Amino acid sequence: MLQFNGAGTLTVTGFRVENSGKLVRSCGNCKTQYKRTIVLSDIDIVAPLKTIVGVNANYGDTATLSKIRIQGDTKKKTQTCVRFKGNNTGKEPTALGTGADGRTCKFAPSDITYK
């Protein structure tokens, strides 16, 4: 839904998403890479959604999630935060892991609720 290619901070608050693959993705293969900060708060998600946010751990990206409400995902298949090894060569980035890690993907279990 939102592709973050530039530098700086992207803050999304009071937003609803449905029928999308990802809510936010930090560019994983842009020619010029930057450190990006993503802040997501007060978000309503209607499943299915593959991933809430994707960030490049190797470029110092961070994603902070709070007050995220996911509806219709009883099996909890929505990936909260996926860490990638981004590149500047145009190749598809490599996934490194998913979920909170306290450095790149910042949130507590209580920040994500399922309805």
Image (spheres, rainbow, N blue to C red):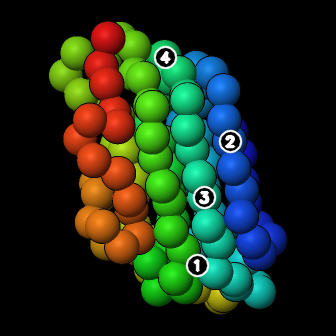
How far across and down, in percent of the image, does residue 105 sit? Answer: 39, 62
Sooner in the amino-acid sequence: mark 3 or mark 1: 3
Residue at 59 percent across and 52 percent down: it is 39
Nearer-N-terminus badge (2/4): 2
In the rendered structure, the answer to whether residue 23 lies left or right of residue 112 reads right
The local secondary structure at tag 3 comes to: strand
Which part of the image, by quadrant, shows the N terminus?
A: top right
Residue 107 in sight in this render: yes
Residue wearing tag 1? 91
Q: Which residue position holds label 2?
A: 12
Badge 1 crowding class, 10 Å Cα cut-off, few under 14, some 14 to 19, many 20 or more, is: few
Mark 3 or mark 4, earlier in chain: 3
C-alpha separation, residue under disc 4 versus residue under disc 1: 30 Å
The reply to whether dot 3 and dot 2 touch (C-beta < 8 Å) is yes
Do the numbered discs 2 and 1 sit on residues whose CB atoms are within 8 Å? no
Residue behind mark 4: 46
